[in-house]
Image (cartoon, grey):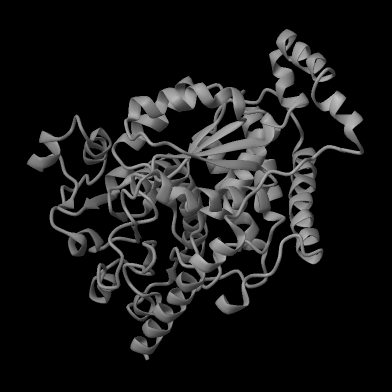
Amino acid sequence: MRDKKRDEEVARAAIWGELAVPWHRHYGGKMETVPRCVVRGMDDFSVWYSPGVAQACTAIEQEPSLVDELTNRGNTVAVVSDGSRVLGLGNIGAKAGYPVMEGKALLYKYLGGVDSMAIMLNDQDPDSIIRTVLNLQSSFGGINLEDIAQPKCFRILDTLRREAEIPVWHDDQQGTATVTLAGLINALHLAGKEFSDVRIAFIGAGAASVACARLIFGHGADPGLCTVSDSRGILTTEREDLRRNRNDYPEKWELAEKTNRDGRTGGIAEALEGADVVISLSTPGPGTILPEWIRRMADKPIVFPEANPVPEIWPWEAQEAGAVVVATGRSDFPNQVNNSLCFPGIFRGALDVRARTISDTMCFAAAEAIAERARRHPDYGPQRIMPTMEEWDLFGDIAAAVGVCAAREGLARVERSAEELRTMALARITRSRRITELMMSDGIIPPPPEESR
């Protein structure tokens, strides 16, 4: 039975892959630029361009903040990547990474009503990337860093969050961490466990795993009760390789100092011994995590194998081994831990209050909004700890929570009520969805090629 399930999942994944190239070729990509203003005739261009546009320029020169009222800059996000770590494909470069970033722009538009464009940098030097993003911020309301390899991704994000005047977000770090936290909130609720008491084994020490640990610790988990493992085993200050490379990988060294109070050593099996939770962003499986290791976890274990395209252990194997809640990164399994549940709503809220940055507290607010939404569903339980992207008004809830939180922290340039933010967000999102529907119904966007269906 398990082999049959595995074969079915492999076959389903292969179908999506077979469709990708012909569909992309058919449409020539996923995004385009269309007007949002009236064009009733050539005279209107005298307002939108010369000579009338000079008055808008002069107004912004006199009051720079007007740029977000008189242009679409305040609703536009750049998805910036150097292609150095794309979707598990590795360092495939700027051009090869473009389809992913364009797909991200599509998600921003359809789910958050946020205009977005892919900016692929043919330059993998971190200092150069930082300079480029700082130079770009006059054109964008926010920056989404994407698929940038570690360890440079940490320095790039931390520097830009400190120096940029607009929100800078690394979805591989902050997005994964936020949606993982949301799932964990509900998993612990169902298991009857508290953040401050649980032992969590983080498997993997890449950007996503490090960010998950940071955010979960910030939300109340005790780092000393937790472990983080990389390909060489559990992080500990006694490991000579970590000590030798601590200047190159300071994030790992910091986790080695903060976690593993008991001084555990060994690999994944030893990390899972007695743990309440395993959160894995590691080598795709199955077989990276074995069922017998789950059996040696604490009572009511929670298992989040989030590797793509194949989780570190199949969900049914984890459940048979005693897991009370299992969540993966896959849409075809229950409880998908999906970044797309959070980043469109987070940026929607940040842009609508013109936030200076996206803080960890704003991420907490988003995670709580996602978790609370799932708890309102009649099917809430071990097989449904997360909402789905079909619940599109969720993004209005997230936007409201994030915008109010930004104002409370003093990070918002414009303060709006939760209801106002939610209404604004839903109006933007409805417009984006409606435009797409109308263009499809009118044949402006044609159906996919018949031969690739």
Residue 181 location (% of width, % of height): 47, 51
Q: Is residue 81 above or below residue 337?
A: above
Q: Quadrant of the N terminus?
A: bottom left
Question: In the image, what residue occupies the spot 39% across and 61% down?
Answer: 306
Question: In the image, what residue occupies the spot 71% across and 21% down?
Answer: 67
Residue 153 location (% of width, % of height): 35, 37
Location of residue 354 by image quarter: top right
Q: Is residue 18 above or below residue 254?
A: below
From the viewer's perspective, is 403 left or right of 317?
right
Residue 53 location (% of width, % of height): 80, 20
Q: Is residue 274 above or below residue 12?
A: above
Query: Taking the image as drawn, is residue 39 in sight?
Result: yes
Residue 437 location (% of width, % of height): 77, 61
From the viewer's perspective, is 382 left or right of 244?
right
Query: Please, which residue is most extreme toward the bottom here?
Result: 1
Q: Nearer the viewer, residue 312 or 190?
A: 312
Q: Nearer the viewer, residue 417 or 282?
A: 282
Q: Nearer the viewer, residue 25 or 291?
A: 25
Question: In the image, what residue occupies the spot 43% across and 65% down?
Answer: 328
